[in-house]
Image (cartoon, rainbow, N blue to C red):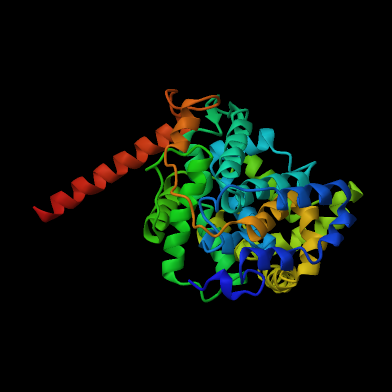
Amino acid sequence: MASLRDDPRYAGTVEERRKRDRRYDFLLKLHGKNGQRALAIAEAPRRDDGYFGLDSISFKVYENVLIAGLGALSGLFISTIDPDGAYGVGQHTTYYYDTVGRIRRSLLFFAGAVAGDTESAHKVGRDLFRKHAHVNGEVPSTGESYRANHVETMKFTYVVGWPHLWRAYKKFGDPSATYEDECQFYKEQVRVCELMGMPAGELPDTPEAVEAWVQNAEKNIMAVTRPAQELYDFLLHNPLTPLYPNAVMGPGIKLAIWASIPLLTPYVREICDLETMRIRPAVGTIAIKGAVRALRNPLVDRLILPWFGYEMWGYMHNAIRHAPDTGPVPFDHGVGMRLQEGKGGTLGDNACPMHALLAAQSADAQSADATAAEGATV
């Protein structure tokens, strides 16, 4: 993995990085109170390098907001193809009336987990877990319950999103990223998920295991429901009103959505009726490649990024300015279990009926395949 230390923005000692990174902070005044909040986070003292550090592949992936955003958008497409996730999004999402705020809160967690110190990483994970504890309800057509913090629901949301984020990074960030980089990325993402309530040992952590899990999900879980279709329609044909923020950021969101379509698997493009789109994804890809390059400029970084997520800007720049370079802290693999056993957790409850049924069907199918294979060898 090529080190971020080869990038002039991250090279040198802590003092040298801090001095260089503060050079254009005066531009944050253009963002008013949000600019002040971003700077406060960037200049806050920190106790350690966190669980990842500047040399992690996850920091490289998330340090450009557009790459992280593309992964989040394609992951959003995917998460709603889980029937439980679709109704959770449909009944609780704020995307329709608070698009910027929803994007900001998503970026906040991942930036805090990857770029924050250990205290910040635990805080953002705990906050997200407790927020999702209220995302509960029933599937209207069946009366079956869902819970956003259920282990199987979380597993679907994040595991199927990982390959899309990695493809976004390969396409727009570092086309020369290696297989070893991808392996390390998945191992690090397992830790990110544990910070928000995933018990240790539940997730695949190699490219092959992730791919196998996604293929099984395509076969046994994924389905397009009405909430999923409504969200796709909103993202692909977002309205111009209210004028702020829709008219301002609508074209940019549309380009990002178009660029994220090629990152989806052929199966997902097919069931979402996106496989015939050719020109718009090509236009979006060209535009996003230019925007990713532009955001590497420190002037553009300060003019644009705090508008989408001042917390993300603050956490990323806090790592640049104040990470002591002592190395990542050994990970606490008990954090996910503690969250699940505490307030808002789901351990001890019955599994989500829909996932329990699908898991049983998958197990029956695997058992039948094994029996058939044994019979063929007799």
- Please give left or right for residue 232 compared with residue 334 in the image: right
Q: Nearer the viewer, residue 26 or 77?
A: 26
**Residue 300, located in which quarter of the rendered image?**
bottom right
Counting the numbered discs, the total is 0
Q: Residue at x 57, y 44 (%)?
A: 121
Identify the residue shown where x is 55% and y is 45%: 118
| Residue 63 shown left or right of residue 216 in the figure | right
Q: Position of residue 229 (x, y in %)?
A: 66, 46
Task: Report the front residue among 84 and 201.
Answer: 201
Work out whether residue 24 can be spotted: yes
Q: Position of residue 10 (x, y in %)?
A: 63, 68
The image shows residue 195 at horizontal and vertical percentages of 52, 42
Locate residue 315 relative to residue 180 in the image: left or right: right
The outermost residue toward the front is 15
Residue 341 against residue 308 in the figure, above or below: above
Q: Residue furthest left?
A: 378
Q: Position of residue 25 (x, y in %)?
A: 81, 61
The reply to whether residue 352 is visible in this rendering is no
Observer-nearest of 138 and 93: 93
Q: Residue at x 62, y 74 (%)?
A: 7
Question: As displayed, is residue 227 above or below residue 55?
Answer: above
Tell me: residue 163, above or below residue 330.
below
**Up/down of 246 relative to 289, above or below:** above
The answer to which quarter of the image holds residue 358 is top left
